[in-house]
Amino acid sequence: MKHQFLRMALVLGLLSAIGPFAIDMYLPALPAIGVALQADVHAVQVSLMAFFISFAISQIVYGPASDIFGRKPPLYVGIALFVAGSIGCALAPDIVWLIAFRFVQGLGGGAPIVVPRAIVRDLHTGVEATKLMALLMLVFSVSPILAPLIGSLVIDAAGWRAIFWVITGIGTLGLLLTALALEETRPAEQRAQSDVASTLRAFALLFRDARFMGLTAVGAFGMASFFIYLANSSFVLIGHYGLTPRQYSLAFAVNAASFIGVSQFAGRLAAGYGLTRVVSVAVAGFALSMSALLAFNLAGIERLDVMIATLLLGFGFLGLVVPATSVMALDDHGEIAGAASALMGTLQLVMGTLVIAVMSIFVDGTARPMVAGIAVAAIVALGLTRMTLGGRRGGLPVSDAA
């Protein structure tokens, strides 16, 4: 049983990493892409936002489709589209075409991020689901930890276009994993109860569920803070602090490792203290850490080691928030897990994209706009946690619906 648990975490984690790998791997190349395609910082960031937008929109389709047709067919369609978009990015002659193919890439990348979450809910609930989600994130961590480093090595060896050929290979591997290593977890009798009308009813139910929407919003602003770091860190660390792409990738990996490493304690902490208490304490720690980082910056303390250390602490707390809020939001909606996962993912990514768009207005080449944006997102997440969970100290029942 434990072997199957770990195997499922490995497969789902690798599938979930496909879309984020397309983000993280090309982060060190953003300045080089701007130079090569004669595009300014804002235009290059639009290529990132285009991916986020389509990544978000597509989830609202793939999630319900996985309820109606089963979990595997949407994966085939989405990953194939992702591969086609990746090839287009590799061949893009200018920034406009790059943005267009990034949009196509995102349309495909939504499937392998939303469907695995639904599969987790098919198999488990409560603490067991939190453990599986955390293990999935451990495998998923290959993207934020290794992707920027791999990207910098690929850039040095073959230029930025080669990154997208590597991503094409990763998408092809995802198709093979889906075909050979993933079993269908949505039985035909359950699919018979799902159609477009039931999907619309499911969305209406979810929008009326204050707990679902609140937990989704907490995760949204938590992830938005990380998206701010994604969109701005290469320009700040390379342009402002003078790091090389390889040094930047190592600095990025340190913070990503904190996010992923701490997440592995989520299941154990949830079993001992309850998911509600874990989320409440973790969000408070996250907001306090990010507020401290902003205070340091405003006080003139802009040392790189201070910023990285504080982000390390803050993203560690965020590593507890993300899997726990995802499990709590989906726990009461097993019959519509695909739709719930899709709506949660879409809302979180739309929020992240909007935050990046707003942040781009204030970009000035220094660390302050990035740091301020991260701190504000963390504080909003804290306020939403208090509104959603209130003063309750308990957690969800320790259950397992395997």
Image (tube, rainbow, N blue to C red):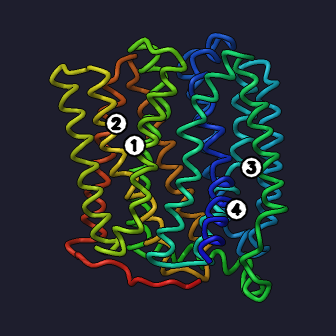
Residue 177 percent location from the top left of the image: 78, 57
- Tell me the SS state at disc 2: helix
| Residue 81 position (above or below residue 209) | above
Rendering quarter of residue 122: bottom right
Q: Which residue is mark 1?
A: 225
Alpha carbon of mark 2 to alpha carbon of mark 4: how far? 30 Å
Tag nearer the camera, 4 or 1:
1
Q: Do tag 1 and tag 2 residues touch (Cβ < 8 Å)? A: yes
Classify 10 Å Cα crowding around label 2: few (below 14), some (14-19), many (20 and above): many
- Tell me the SS state at disc 1: helix
| Residue type marked 2 | Gly
**N-terminal-most mark, 1 or 2:** 1
**N-terminal-most mark, 3 or 2:** 3
Residue 358 percent location from the top left of the image: 43, 35
Classify 10 Å Cα crowding around label 3: few (below 14), some (14-19), many (20 and above): many
**N-terminal-most mark, 1 or 3:** 3
Residue at the image position 54 percent from the left and 67 percent from the top: 132
Q: Which residue is mark 3?
A: 108
Classify 10 Å Cα crowding around label 4: few (below 14), some (14-19), many (20 and above): many
Classify 10 Å Cα crowding around label 1: few (below 14), some (14-19), many (20 and above): many
Alpha carbon of mark 4 to alpha carbon of mark 1: how far? 25 Å
Residue 328 percent location from the top left of the image: 43, 72
Q: Which residue is mark 2?
A: 373
Front in this rendered view, residue 104 or 323: 323
Alpha carbon of mark 1 to alpha carbon of mark 2: how far? 7 Å
Residue at the image position 76 percent from the left and 30 percent from the top: 89
Q: Is residue 118 left or right of residue 73?
A: left
| Residue type marked 3 | Gly
| Residue type marked 1 | Ser
- Tell me the SS state at disc 3: helix
